[in-house]
Image: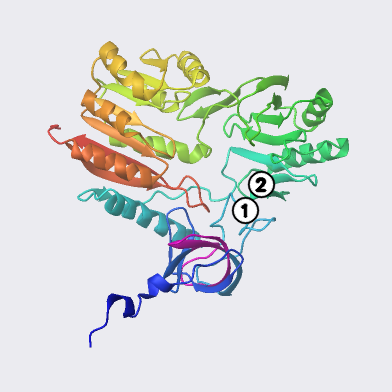
């Protein structure tokens, strides 16, 4: 007698019990996913394990459970990997959002980043035939950041939100990604605010005063800029400025007031309490003015390696017209201008474009022009004004380029496209769209801008298939 479909033994995946937050599981980690979490399986279900590395057996607590996967955090390492090393964070590396891979041997970090770029391009972008060049390792793997953004906590803490626990602020005495000076000035501000009895902002209730402290440094110039972000209200601002300048006479102190409900450090009204509004820095032999909220690569030394690689891929001979989309304060545009006939930079931020224009003037560069505008709408009129580019350079945010922006770039039919990516999973579909339109992905090279994190920067070169060298 044959069985009816309803009487068949059901597939394990169908009857699998959904995990519940709070459950504790013993898991064997097999791999690292894009984004940095360990990958394990429990009864056929994929579990992404924060703090777990390949080859380890861990005890993990489920923090989120979906139908097809779950997220967990390590609460105990039962069998550590041979690649696990001692953490250097004084506030617990597994909870630290800034350096979640600090317990993984650096050589393994590089191997995983190299592999993840290749997997993103081949699996997500269905791309092949490109050369994946060896990852460029960081010159310094500790204390490399020129900018850190700290949050105030309800108990007088000043540090970072614990990963996955935004209500919890980890107090920081020595962040190993920040310079000694950065740590010292942060601790000074923390202690001064605590002595004043100033309350921390609670974004759930919308109450409290202190929100963030942003510390930026000019690694080459020695400049030091602090920007205190608060809610509405007042405090002894000039006394804080005096306390900071007595220890750090080179420091600039800015005060930003915002009414935004969410925890953000941009927007609002900013006053200069001491020093200059701008930070000064040098990169690739050029000088730059940086506005308080303008983007600047947070690893100065590796930014030079990144730009050098992008210039190599660009292959400029001195007679080309270049479009630099998402140009920011003009760092890459001005570097390219030394090798091109003309460079046209576009960015949506008017403040950044103002900086870019000033930076061109300061460096006595007259073949670079800058315009504020959304790339999606600016490319067509720019091509009409400047004529078609020989090279387009893009350095978009993590979300990558929209399909419309890619189409607008393709309309200009540049001979080469140099794509500087901070996210290989968005580079892949963008490159796929370009190759489908007649371009060839020639080569890609990762650059490790952010040791001890899963973030991956890379440079890709695409050439028009009919372009003749």
Residue 193 among those drawn in magenta: no
Residue 62 among those drawn in magenta: yes
Q: Is residue 174 visible?
A: no
Residue assigned mark 2: 160
Q: Residue at x 28, y 76 (%)?
A: 5
Q: Residue at x 23, y 88 (%)?
A: 1
> Alpha-carbon distance for marks 2 and 1?
7 Å
Main SS category, magenta section = strand
Residue assigned mark 1: 96
* Horizontal side of residue 278 vs 339, given as left or right: right
Q: Position of residue 309 (x, y in %)?
A: 35, 38
Q: Residue at x 57, y 23 (%)?
A: 291
Q: Position of residue 296 (x, y in %)?
A: 51, 31
* Horizontal side of residue 231 vs 303, given as left or right: right
First in sequence, mark 2 or 1: give its number. Answer: 1
Q: Residue at x 87, y 35 (%)?
A: 196
Q: Position of residue 66 (x, y in %)?
A: 48, 60
Whether residue 353 is situated above or below residue 106 in the rendered picture: above
Q: Which mark is residue 434?
A: none
Q: Do the residues bearing badges 2 and 1 touch, measured as CB atoms within 8 Å?
A: yes
Question: What segment is highlighted magenta in the picture?
Answer: 48-72
């Amino acid at each position: 007698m044959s069985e009816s479909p309803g009487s068949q033994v059901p597939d394990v995946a169908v009857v699998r019990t959904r995990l519940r937050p709070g459950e504790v599981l013993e898991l064997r980690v097999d791999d690292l996913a894009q984004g940095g979490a360990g990958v394990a399986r429990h009864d056929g279900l994929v579990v992404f394990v924060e703090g777990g590395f390949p080859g380890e057996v861990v005890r993990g607590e489920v923090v989120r459970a979906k139908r097809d996967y779950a997220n967990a955090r390590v609460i105990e390492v039962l069998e550590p990997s041979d690649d696990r090393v001692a953490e250097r964070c004084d506030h617990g590396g597994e909870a630290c959002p800034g350096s979640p891979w600090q317990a993984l041997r650096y050589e393994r970090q590089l191997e995983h980043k190299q592999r993840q770029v290749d997997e993103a391009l081949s699996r997500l972008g269905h791309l092949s035939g490109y050369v994946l060049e060896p990852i460029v390792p960081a010159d310094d793997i500790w204390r490399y950041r020129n900018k850190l953004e700290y949050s105030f906590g309800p108990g007088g803490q000043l540090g970072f939100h614990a990963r996955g626990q935004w209500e919890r602020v980890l107090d920081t005495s020595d962040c190993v990604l920040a310079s000694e000076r950065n740590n010292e000035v942060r601790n000074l501000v923390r202690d001064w605010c605590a002595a004043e009895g100033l309350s921390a902002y609670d974004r759930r209730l919308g109450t409290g005063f202190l929100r963030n402290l942003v510390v930026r440094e000019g690694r080459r110039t020695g400049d030091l800029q602090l920007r205190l972000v608060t809610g509405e209200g007042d405090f002894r601002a000039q006394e804080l400025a005096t306390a900071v300048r007595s220890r750090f006479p080179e420091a600039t102190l800015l005060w930003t007031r915002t009414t935004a409900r969410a925890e953000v450090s941009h927007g609002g009204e900013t006053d200069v309490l001491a020093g200059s509004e701008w930070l000064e820095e040098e990169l690739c032999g050029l000088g730059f003015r940086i506005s308080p909220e303008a983007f600047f690569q947070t690893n100065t030394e590796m930014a030079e390696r990144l730009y050098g690689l992008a210039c190599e891929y660009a292959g400029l001979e001195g007679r080309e017209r270049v479009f630099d989309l998402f140009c920011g304060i003009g760092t890459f545009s001005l570097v390219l201008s030394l090798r091109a006939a003309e460079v046209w930079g576009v960015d949506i931020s008017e403040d950044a474009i103002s900086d870019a224009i000033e930076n061109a003037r300061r460096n006595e560069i007259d073949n670079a022009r800058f315009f504020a505008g959304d790339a999606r709408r600016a490319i067509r009129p720019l091509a009409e004004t400047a004529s078609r580019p020989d090279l387009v350079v893009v350095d978009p945010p993590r979300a990558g380029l929209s399909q419309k922006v890619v189409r607008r770039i393709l309309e200009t039919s540049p001979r080469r496209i140099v794509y500087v990516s901070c996210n290989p999973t968005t580079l892949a579909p963008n490159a796929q769209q370009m190759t489908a339109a007649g371009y060839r992905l020639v080569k890609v090279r990762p650059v490790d801008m952010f040791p001890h994190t899963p973030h991956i920067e890379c440079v890709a070169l695409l050439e028009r298939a009919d372009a003749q060298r």
